[in-house]
Amino acid sequence: MEKPSYSGHRARLKKRFEKGGISSFLEHEILELLLTYCITRKDTKPLAWALLRKFGSLGGVLEATPSELEEVEGIGNNSVVFIKLIRELMRFYFLEEIKKRKEITTPENVVDFCRASLQGEANEIFEVIYLTTRNAVIGVERISVGTIDRASVSPRKIIEQALKRRAAALIFVHNHPSGEPEPSKEDIELTETLSRVAAPLGISVLDHIVVGKGKFFSIRANSLITMKKEKV
C-alpha cells in the first residue's frame, strides 16, 4: 500500500527531535509530534493548529479540561488522556525535583511545581507542602477542591496532617482560575489564621503562594503578613 502523504512529515519531525530535542521546534510542531503518539492514522498538523487556535498556546492546551479538549473536532478520548498524562507527568517530575532540594528558601524554589500542579485548573484548589526542620520537602497534599472561585480549607485538618507527618514547616499553594494571582482579603486572613494556629505547636508557615495564568504571588515576599516560628 502507498504510504500516506503525512508519514514522511512525521518521520522528519521525529528525526529532528532525536537529533536536537525541541529547542528548534515551533509550538504547533511540538503538538504535532505529541499527537502522532496517540493518533496513528491521521495528519496531526491541522489538529495541532486547531488546538492552538482554541487555547492560544501549548500551555493553554496542556491546561485545558478534558471536556474543552473534546470540543476540538478530531480530538478523541485517546488524545485527551495522552495530553492530560503529559500534564500529570510534569506535576510528578516537579514534585520529585523539589523533594531533591536540601532546603526550600524562596518562592522560586517551588513555583514550577505550583504551576504544573495548579495552573489551568477550572476550580480553586488548595495544597500544602510539608517540610522538615531544614525545609526539605516531606510531601504534598491536596487539601481542598472548591468551586470556580472558592476552596474550603480546614485549619484543623492541616494541623492534624502536619503533626502526623512530623512537619516543622508548611508552605500553602492555591490557584486562582480567573488568572490573576493577587490574594484576596480571605486568602490573607486564612494565612494569618493558619500561621497563628501552627506557631504554638512549633510549626512555622513559610509562605502562601497563589498561582494565576503564567504568574504567581508570594504572600511572604510581598510582606502582607509576618510569618515566623515561635518557640513552644
Image (cartoon, rainbow, N blue to C red):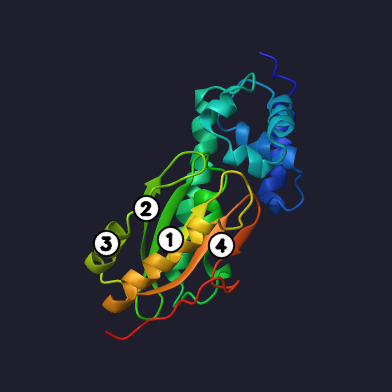
- Asked whether the beta carbons under mark 1 and mark 2 sit within 8 Å of each other, the answer is yes
Q: Residues within 10 Å of mark 2 (few under 14, many from 20)?
A: some
Q: 63 above or below 108?
A: above
**Nearer to us: label 2 or label 3:** 2
Residue identifier under label 2: 153
Is residue 106 at all visible to an observer of this figure?
yes
Residue identifier under label 3: 161
Question: Element at badge 2?
Answer: loop
Identify which amino acid the numbered label 1 is placed on. Answer: Leu
Image side of residue 91 versus residue 62, left or right: left
Image side of residue 59 versus residue 232, left or right: right
Which residue is painted at 49% across and 51% down in the image? 117
Q: Residues within 10 Å of mark 3 (few under 14, many from 20)?
A: some
**Nearer to us: label 4 or label 2:** 2
Q: Name the N-terminal-most of marks 1 and 3.
A: 3
The disc placed on residue 190 is 1
User: Where does the image place residue 184, in percent across and percent down from the top left?
Assistant: 55, 56
Which residue is painted at 75% across and 21% down in the image? 5
The disc placed on residue 111 is 4
Question: Which residue is at the front of the view, 5 or 115?
Answer: 115
**Nearer to us: label 3 or label 4:** 3
Which quadrant holds the C terminus? Answer: bottom left
Q: Residues within 10 Å of mark 1 (few under 14, many from 20)?
A: some
User: Where does the image place residue 6, in percent across and percent down from the top left?
Assistant: 73, 25
Q: CA distance from mark 1 to mark 3?
A: 17 Å
Q: Name the N-terminal-most of marks 3 and 4.
A: 4
Identify which amino acid the numbered label 4 is placed on. Answer: Val
Question: Element at badge 4?
Answer: helix
Q: CA distance from mark 1 to mark 2?
A: 8 Å
